[in-house]
Image (spheres, helix red, strand yellow):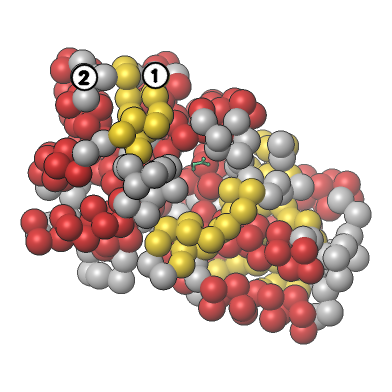
Amino acid sequence: MSKVYFKEISYIKELLASVEHTQLFVLADENSKEHCYPLIKDYLEYHQVIEIASGEKHKTLDSCNLIWNALTNATADRKALLINLGGGVITDMGGFCAATFKRGIQFINIPTTLLSQVDASVGAKTGIDYNGYKNHIGLFCEAEAVLVNPIFHKTLPQEQIVSGYAEMLKHGLIADKKHWQDCLDNGIEKFSNELIQQSVKIKEQVVEADPTEKGLRKILNFGHTIGHAIETHLLNTENELLHGEAIGLGMIAEAYISKSKGLLNEQEYQIVVNELKGVYKSPKIEKASYAEIKRLCKQDKKNQNGELNMSLLKNIGHAVYDITVEEELIDKALNEIL
Ligand code: GLY
C-alpha cells in the first residue's frame, strides 16, 4: 500500500530522489496551479505542468485525452513520473491516466484539499465519471507515495473544509467512535495534523484488510450510494454540491435506512442525524427527482444481481455491508433529508 507521509512540503525532494524517473510532470487544475503549485515548485527539478479545468464536471474522458496528449507530445516514456497536485478529481483522474498511459507510469499524490487528504488520494482507487455515472471507469493502482500537509488548507474556501469533514466523520461512524467524537469536539474551523492522521489511519486499516473491495472496504462507502446519486443529479445545476457535501446528505439518508432496517438504534440515530443536519443542508430537490436519484443508485458499484446493496451503520463506530435495500426505503430516506 502507498505510504502516506505527513511531512514538510520540502520532503518532495526526497520522494523524487527515491523514485527512479526520466521526466517529471505535474498535473494541476487552475486553482491548484495558482494557489498550491507556487508552494512546491522550488522543490522540483525540471518539469512540465499539465493543467486541466477544475471540478467534478471535468472528471471525464475529454480531460483524460488532454492529459494523455500532453504526455504523448512530450514523448513521456514508461519511466516518466506524474505528480497529482490537487483535490479528489485530480488525484483520481491523474492516477487513472498514469495507470493507463503506456500501460502504466508512476505517480505521486500531493492532495491539496482536506477531502483528498483524508480519503481520495489514499487507497489506490483511480478513475473518472462516465456518461454521468460517478467513478464508473477506473482501476486500483497504487501511488508511489502520498504527501499530506495541512498548509494547503489555507488556500481553500470553507466549503472545501466542510466537504472533507464529511469523510472524516464517516471514518468515525463506520469504524471508530472516538474519532467521530474527536471530530465533533474539534468542529470545522481548523484541523490538527493529528486529527487528519487519525482519519487516514482508519482508512488505511480498512484498505489494508481488503485492498480491492471484495468485502470489508465497502464500509468506506457508507453514505455514498445516495450521496453519489444526489451529487450526480445536481451536477451542472445551480445547486451543485461538492462531493463531501453530498456525502453528508447521503449519510443522513443512509442512517435513516440503517434505523429502518433495525440496525441503528433510535437514540444513536438521533445523535448522528442531528450532528449531520447541523452541517449538511439539503438544497431543494423536487419529489419528481426521486426516480432519477433511484435510477442513479442502481448504477452503484456495490449492487449485485439487480439488488441494491448498501453499507449501513450498526452503531456509531461500526458499519456493515452488502445490506439489500428496497427502493421504497430510498424514497423515505430522501424525505428525511429534504
Ligand atoms: N472512498 C472510498 C474508498 O476509498 O474505498
Q: What residue type is labelled 2?
A: Gly
Earlier sequence position, callout 1 versus callout 2: 2
Among the 4 quarters of the image, the one containing residue 70: bottom right
Mark 1–mark 2 Cα distance, whole angstroms, equals 16 Å
Residue assigned mark 1: 317
Residue to which mark 2 is pinned:
262
The answer, for residue 14, to whether it is visible in the render is yes
Spot occupied by residue 166 in the image (x, y as percentages of width and height): 37, 39
Q: Position of residue 14 (x, y in %)?
A: 84, 46
Amino acid of disc 1: Gly
Q: Outermost residue toward the bottom?
A: 73
Q: Which of 131 and 154 is in front in this view?
A: 131
**Which one is nearer the viewer's eye here, 31 or 175?**
175
Q: In the shown orientation, is residue 273 left or right of residue 48?
A: left
Seen from the viewer's position, the closer of residues 85 and 171 is: 171
- Residue 184 makes an appearance in the image: no
